[in-house]
Amino acid sequence: MPKFLRIGILQSNVSGYTSKAWCVRRIGSAVFLKWGAVKVHGAGDGRKVYWTLPPREKTVRCGTAQRAQDYAKAAIARRRNHRYEPLAGPIAIRRRSADRSAELKQALATIMIVDIVGSTEKAAKLGDARWTKVMGHYYAAVRKELKTSRGKEVVTTGDGVLATFKVPAAGISCATAIQKAVRTLGLEIRVGLHAGEYKMSGTEVVGLAFHIGARVAAKARAGEVLVSSAVKDLMSQSQIRFRDHGVHQLKGVPERWRLYRVED
């Protein structure tokens, strides 16, 4: 059975940040699809992949074996075009502890969400080979600045990064440094930062703070770094300048939040 794994953030998943896997199989004139959220542990030959919830399933009856074969090939091609990577081996259903809450560790951090503006259009214009090369330089630049600012990379999407910092000033400094670095690649980014608590269970991170950070980033325009009032309030003694960006209702987030734009 061909299997495809996409490592990335599902922004619509309100319970946390996960990856997604698709399985495609043809038997005769029927195609069987299976997909859902997964967790990835380890790397290389020791990597293990688990369904976080029972996967969804669908059967497509194509009438003839040739149509089913064409359908399966097209389904596989679409997922490869979306930067899914081939996944070797089965996907297991992980047995969770009945007292899962006891495994959770709580932490406080400044959360940074970086997103490339217009990435789909740029990828289509450049083509897969050139875009892959640009993205390699992009992630190298991002990781260089994260290392300099002592930030911790949590997860990456096809064109974005989620990272945490112990202090907000380091996160803002990192965001502006990344902006300057990726402009040399012809890329513009939007960045959102929020400070709050989140919980960790192994490699899994959950918490409303991550979603607030993502919604703050979504409010930013190309070239902007926006921060929530929670970040601004922690920086009363900082030399970093902010411009009031108004009060906003963040999608799916309770209450309204005042946002601030980081000034150059």
Image (cartoon, rainbow, N blue to C red):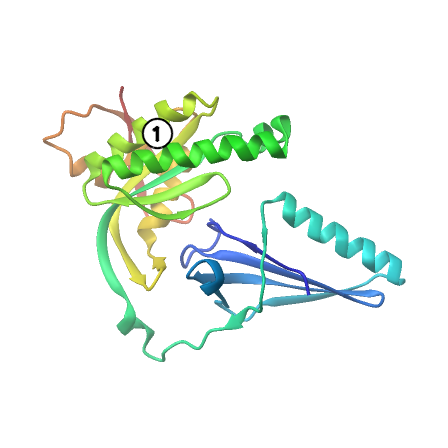
Quadrant showing the N terminus: bottom right
The amino acid marked with disc number 1 is Ile
Residue 248 at x, y percent in the picture: 35, 36
Count of numbered marks: 1
* Crowd tier of the residue under label 1, counting other residues whose Cα lies within 10 Å: few below 14, some 14–19, many 20 or above: many
Q: Nearer the viewer, residue 79 or 234?
A: 79
User: In the current view of this chain or complex, which residue is farthest to the front?
Assistant: 45
Residue 149: tell me if it is visible: yes
Q: Nearer the viewer, residue 197 or 257?
A: 197
Residue 102 at x, y percent in the picture: 27, 73
Q: Which residue was labeled with disc 1?
A: 178
State which quadrant residue 214 falls in: top left
Q: Residue at x 44, y 32 (%)?
A: 138
State which quadrant residue 148 falls in: top left
Q: Is residue 237 left or right of residue 73?
A: left
Q: Residue at x 88, y 58 (%)?
A: 66
Residue 254: tell me if it is visible: no
Residue 139 lies, with reference to residue 33, above or below; the image says above
Residue 179 at x, y percent in the picture: 36, 26
Residue 185 lies, with reference to residue 197, above or below; the image says above
Q: Is residue 85 left or right of residue 255?
A: right
Residue 14 lies, with reference to residue 125, above or below; the image says below
User: In the current view of this chain or complex, which residue is farthest to the left?
Assistant: 237
Quadrant showing the C terminus: top left
Q: Nearer the viewer, residue 72 or 190?
A: 72
Q: Is residue 58 left or right of residue 19?
A: right
Residue 132 lies, with reference to residue 25, above or below; the image says above
Q: Residue at x 35, y 29 (%)?
A: 178
Q: Residue at x 48, y 35 (%)?
A: 136
Residue 145 at x, y percent in the picture: 30, 33
Q: Which type of secondary structure does the marked residue at label 1 adopt?
A: helix
User: In the current view of this chain or complex, which residue is farthest to the bottom?
Assistant: 98
